[in-house]
């Protein structure tokens, strides 16, 4: 469907030899707006940007979790090494305990 506006004008034309009346008509057609409105397009753009932000934040969170797990594993291995070295050197462990108890 299209919207149409038409206009008719009667014009009298006088010449030295004759006088006549002419009808001029003009029609303007406006096609219907097919497709998305500006508001719908804006809503789609906002939705895509929000979805992209959520995906990026999810990916960054996963990386942070991996880093935290790695740090935790490193701390556990360092604690295990410290515990192993303390039990393998009882004299060192006893002297450290004595020093610690003196400072209290």
Image (spheres, grey):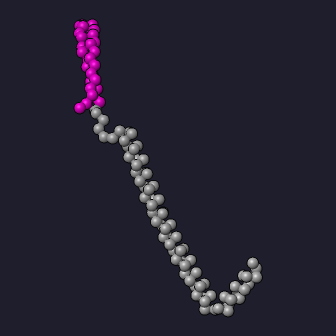
In the depicted structure, whether residue 68 falls above or below residue 17:
below
The quadrant of the picture occupied by the C terminus is bottom right
Residue 40 image offset from top left, x and y in percent: 36, 41
The quadrant of the picture occupied by the N terminus is top left
Q: Quadrant of residue 79?
A: bottom right
Residue 14 image offset from top left, x and y in percent: 28, 8
Q: Between 6 and 35, which is closer to the camera in this rendering? A: 35
Residue under the point 25% across and 19% down: 25
Q: Between 2 and 59, which is closer to the camera in this rendering? A: 59
Residue 5 image offset from top left, x and y in percent: 28, 23
Left or right, residue 36 beside residue 79: left
Q: Between 27 and 72, which is closer to the camera in this rendering? A: 72
Residue under the point 25% across and 30% down: 2
Residue under the point 27% across and 10% down: 12
Left or right, residue 39 beside residue 104: left
Answer whether residue 29 is magenta in the image: yes
Q: Which residues are magenta?
A: 1-30
Q: Between 16 and 95, which is closer to the camera in this rendering? A: 95
Numbered disc total: 0
Left or right, residue 72 beside residue 18: right
Residue under the point 30% across and 40% down: 35
Left or right, residue 36 beside residue 66: left
Residue 65 image offset from top left, x and y in percent: 49, 68
Answer whether residue 84 is magenta in the image: no
Magenta residues, dominant SS class = strand
In the depicted structure, whether residue 29 falls above or below residue 82:
above
């Amino acid at each position: 469907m299209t919207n149409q506006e038409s206009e008719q004008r009667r014009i009298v034309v006088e010449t030295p030899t004759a006088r006549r009346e002419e009808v001029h008509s003009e029609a303007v057609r406006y096609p219907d707006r097919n497709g998305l409105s500006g508001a719908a397009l804006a809503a789609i753009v906002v939705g895509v940007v929000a979805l992209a932000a959520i995906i990026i934040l999810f990916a960054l969170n996963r990386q942070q979790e991996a880093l935290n797990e790695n740090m935790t594993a490193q701390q556990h291995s360092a604690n295990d090494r410290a515990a192993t070295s303390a039990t393998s050197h009882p004299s060192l462990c006893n002297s450290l305990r004595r020093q610690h108890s003196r400072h209290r």
